[in-house]
Image (spheres, helix red, strand yellow):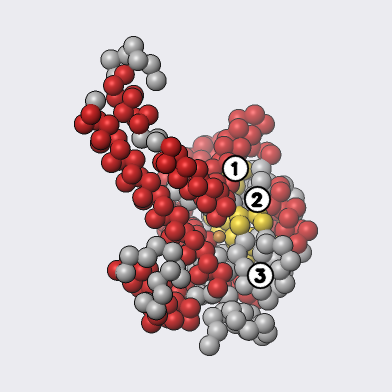
Amino acid sequence: MGWFGWSSSSKSTNEDPPLRQDRQKCWETRDAYFACLDRVGVVKAGDEGKQCAVENAAYNENCARSWIDYFNKRRVIAEQQKGLLAAANTQAQDAKRTS
Amino acid sequence: MSQQTPSGARDRAAVGVFTPKAAILFVAVGTGLFMYFRHEKQKLLEQKQKELESRQYGRAHVGGPFSLMTHKGEPFTDKDLLGKWTLLYFGFTNCPDICPAELDKMTTIVDKIESTYGPIVQPVFLSVDPARDSPCQIAKYLTDFHPRFVGLTGSYEDVKATCKAYRVYFSTPPGTKPGDDYLVDHSIFVYLMDPEGQFVEAFGQVTTVEEVLGRFEKELREWAKEKGRKV
Ligand SMILES: [Cu+2]
């Protein structure tokens, strides 16, 4: 079952753009999948092994490949930023304590 | 980072944040950001460029003649923007989240202006993905947003020329075919043009509805004072 008609199959007879309910559905399944990745402590989609399979299937079912790639990359970058901020904060705190 | 100042200790603490490891991470993250969020980066760059240009050359340098087609398949040129204020956004229908959020914001803004002043603002969506965004496709897409939205598309050359005139950057991945699944990297601005087609302001993604309304009303007051009319 495809997404907007051009997801997996090469034939694109369906010219419909994503509409509000399509986007909503995609974002919801993305959020559910990412929540599962959070639970199992995985940042990069695909590193979770056999875990989150149900959530991932729903995500793949409801989002275009290009969107999935975009959201997954954005998640990694956001996590890196969070980690960087946390590291910077810890170090700033340490520096403050020793100075 | 002067040691002589009383805040020297604090300065040293701030420098300590950037250990070699953090520095490498910082560069790595920066590279990642550059690769995937040129969208955002470009937005900032263009904002700066725009500010510079509007200061140096005035407003006339954003915008210009164009000839495109509406979502109903009718011809549409820059002349059709005259006699109304215009809120103009460049995007594409397969945009994952930024475009629809911006178009929702525009819908709210246009509704608010309309309830006070009547339909004096024309919302326009201009596709930066003409290969996939046919008039029919744009028409379906726009049903989610303000009913008075005009969708514009055209040949790749015409769209490219229009974007150049409006200083909008966009980039389609190489070698794509119309039916392919891809994203288009593009600058994210809502442009406000006056009823004579002159550029007023470019609003970035972080600009709130209230800020846009405030800017619009200020411009409208000045315009009405000068011209004795609202459009
Ligand atoms: Cu977009």
* Residue B54 location, quadrant: top right
Label 1 with label 2: CB-CB less than 8 Å: yes
Q: Are marks 1 and 3 in contact (CB under 8 Å)?
A: no
Which residue does the numbered mark 3 point to in the structure image? B133
Tags 1 and 3 on a common chain = yes
Of residues B40 and B111, the one nearer the viewer is B40
**Residue annotated with mark 1:** B46
- Pointer 3 chain: B
Residue B8 appears at what percent x and percent y? 31, 19
What's the amino acid at mark 1? Glu
At x 76%, y 58%, the residue is B158
Q: Quadrant of the C terminus of chain A?
A: top left
Can you tell me which quadrant of the image ligand 1 is in? Answer: bottom right
Residue lying at the far top in this picture: please name it. B4
Regarding residue B227, the answer to whether it shows in the image is: no
The residue identified by callout 2 is B169
List x then y, in percent, for residue B86.
58, 53
Residue A78, compared with residue B135, is above or below; it is: above
Task: State whether residue B211 is above or below residue B171.
Answer: above
Reading the chain from its start, which is encountered first: label 2 or label 3?
A: 3
Considering only vertical position in the picture, is B191 above or below B20?
Answer: below
Q: Name the amino acid, label 3.
A: Asp
